[in-house]
Amino acid sequence: MSGHVARARLRSETTPTREAFREFVSREISPHADLFDREERIPDEVIQKIADAGYLGAVIPAESGGLGLDMVSLGVLHEEMGRGCSSARSLLTVQTMVAFAILKYGSRGQRIAWLPALAAGRAIAGFALTEPSAGSDVSAMQMTAAKRDQRFVLNGCKQWITFGQIANVFLVFAKCDGKSTAFLVERDRPGLSIEPISGMLGTRASLLARLTFVECEIPRENLISGVGFGMAAVGAAALDLGRYSVACGCTGIAQACLDASMQHADSRVQFGAALRMHQLVSSLLSQIAVNVKAARLLCRHAGELKDAGDPSTVGETLVAKYFASTIATKAAADAVQIHGALGCSSESSVQRYFRDAKVMEIIEGSSQMQMLMIAEEAYASNGAAA
Amino acid sequence: MSLLEEVKPRTREFIKRHFRHLDFADDEDIFALGFVNSLFALQLVMFVEKSFQFTVDDEDLRMENFQSINAVAELVKRKTA
C-alpha cells in the first residue's frame, strides 16, 4: 500500500466525513445565511453550535480540545462551510489562522492559555495585519511596538479585521525596532478601541472592525515567536493557511452556485422547455461543473502537500486560491445570469454568492498579488528563479 | 553520506532552486542579499523540517539559525544530536 493510499485510508477511518460537515451546514447554516447577510451578523447561538461541533478548533489537537484534523479534511470542512455561508467560513478561517500560529510557534504558556478556549469557542480570534496604508504592501506597516521595561506599548491602527467586533484575542502585527513582530492582544486591554465596520459588498456577516491602539500596554509574554525572520515565517504560515481556507471556501461557493443553478434550470420553463434544455444555459452549467471539480482537486493537492510538510504547498496554495476565487466569481456571475431577475433579488441566495465571491478575489492576497507570486514560484519550481 | 553530510549540499540546492543566479558562500548571510521574502522564509523552514526530520519550534525560529548554509547545518546538528 503506498503512503498516499495509506494516509487516505487512515483519514477516512478517523476523521469526520464530508457528509457530516455537509449535514451540519445544510441544517444549521445554509437556511439562515441570507438572514445573516441582511442582518450583517452571525448570531451567538449559531457560533456556539459551530464551536460545539468542534469546527472552531479543527486544527487544534485533541489533547487541547480540538478535532486535530489533517489539512485535507480541514479543507473539506471549509469548502462545505463556504458552500453554506462565506461569513461563517471566514470565522473558521481566522480562528484557524490564529490557532495554527499559536500551536506552531506560540510558547507553552500561550498554547495552554488559548488553544482550549479557541477550540471550545470561549475565545474568538482576530487576525490583525491590514492597516489603512498597508494592504498588499505589508512592509508599509506603520503600527509600532515599543519596548518599555518588561512590556510592549502598541500604537497604530488595523483595518478590515474579520470578526473584530466580537473577537476576544487578536494576533497583532507591529514593527518593533523596525522589525516585524507579532503579539497576542486581549480585547480588554486598556488603550485598544474597536469600531464596527458595516455596509460591505460581501461577507457582510463577518463583523468587521477597525482597531485603534493608543499606548496599549501588553506584557512581554504576549510576544509570539521572535522578531524579523521568526515573524516573517509565522505570518507567512498563517496567511498560507488562510489562503488555503479561502480557496476551499471558494470551491464551496462555486458548488453552491452549481446546485442553485441546476435546480433553477430544471424547474424554470421558457419557450416550452426547462432552461437546462437550452444549450446556452447548459453550457454555463457545464463550465461551472468543470471549474468546481478543478478547484476541488487543486485544493486537495495543496492540502496533501501540507499534510506531507512539503514546502511546495506554499506555491500550490497560491495556485488553488487564485483559481478557486476566480472561478467562484465567474460561477456566481453565471448563476445570477441563469436565474435572471430572480438572481438579482433578495429572494435568491445567488446574489449573495455573487457579492461574496468578489470579496474572495481580494482577501488573503488579491488575484494580482497571487499572479505575481505564482509566476515567481513557477520559475523556482523550474530552478530558474532570480 | 550521513544526514549531517547531506545538510549543506541539500540546503544549497534548495536555495539555488529559488535563486538560481545567486552566488554565495556557505557562511554568507542570504537574507542580507535582499532577495528573500516571507514566503521563502516559510518554505525554508518547511524544507528543513521535512528534509532533516525535526520540528522547528518557536525558540529555533530565529534568523541566525537560517541565514546561511552553515547556520542551517549547525541547527540540524544541534536538533538531531
Image (cartoon, coloured by chain):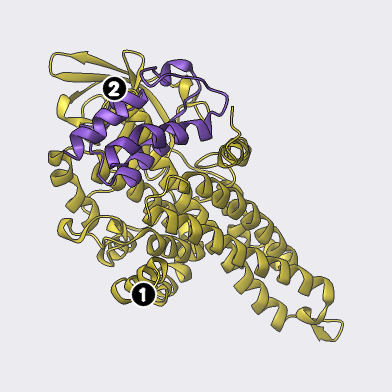
Residue A9's disc number? 1
Q: Is residue A380 above or below residue A335?
A: above
Question: Quick check: A192 left or right of A236?
Answer: left
Q: What hue does chain A carry in this figure?
A: yellow
Q: Give the distance between the C-alpha atoms of the residues marked 2 and 1, in whole angstroms.
A: 41 Å
Q: Chain of mark 1?
A: A
Q: What hue does chain B carry in this figure?
A: purple
Question: Quick check: B28 left or right of A284?
Answer: left
Residue at image position (24%, 46%) is: A103
Q: Nearer the viewer, residue A99 or B30?
A: B30
- Kindly tell me whether residue A168 is visible in this rendering: no
Q: Position of residue A100 (x, y in %)?
A: 30, 47
Quadrant the C terminus of chain A occupies: top right
Q: Is residue A67 above or below residue A166?
A: below
Q: Secondary structure at mark 2?
A: helix
Residue B64's disc number? 2
Image quadrant assignment for residue A256: bottom right
**Crowd rating for badge 1 (residues with CA inside 10 Å; few <14, some 14–19, many 20+):** few
Question: What is the number of callouts on the image?
Answer: 2
Q: Nearer the viewer, residue A115 or A266?
A: A115
Residue at image position (28%, 27%) is: B65
The answer to whether the residue labelled 2 contacts the one labelled 1, judged by CB atoms less than 8 Å apart, is no
**Crowd rating for badge 2 (residues with CA inside 10 Å; few <14, some 14–19, many 20+):** few
Q: Secondary structure at mark 1?
A: helix
Q: Position of residue B31 (x, y in %)?
A: 42, 20
- Kindly tell me whether residue A351 is visible in this rendering: yes
Residue at image position (77%, 74%) is: A282
Residue at image position (65%, 56%) is: A327
Amino acid under disc 1: Arg
Q: Of all residues shown, which one is farthest toward the bottom? A: A272
Amino acid under disc 2: Glu
Q: Is residue A250 above or below residue A106?
A: below
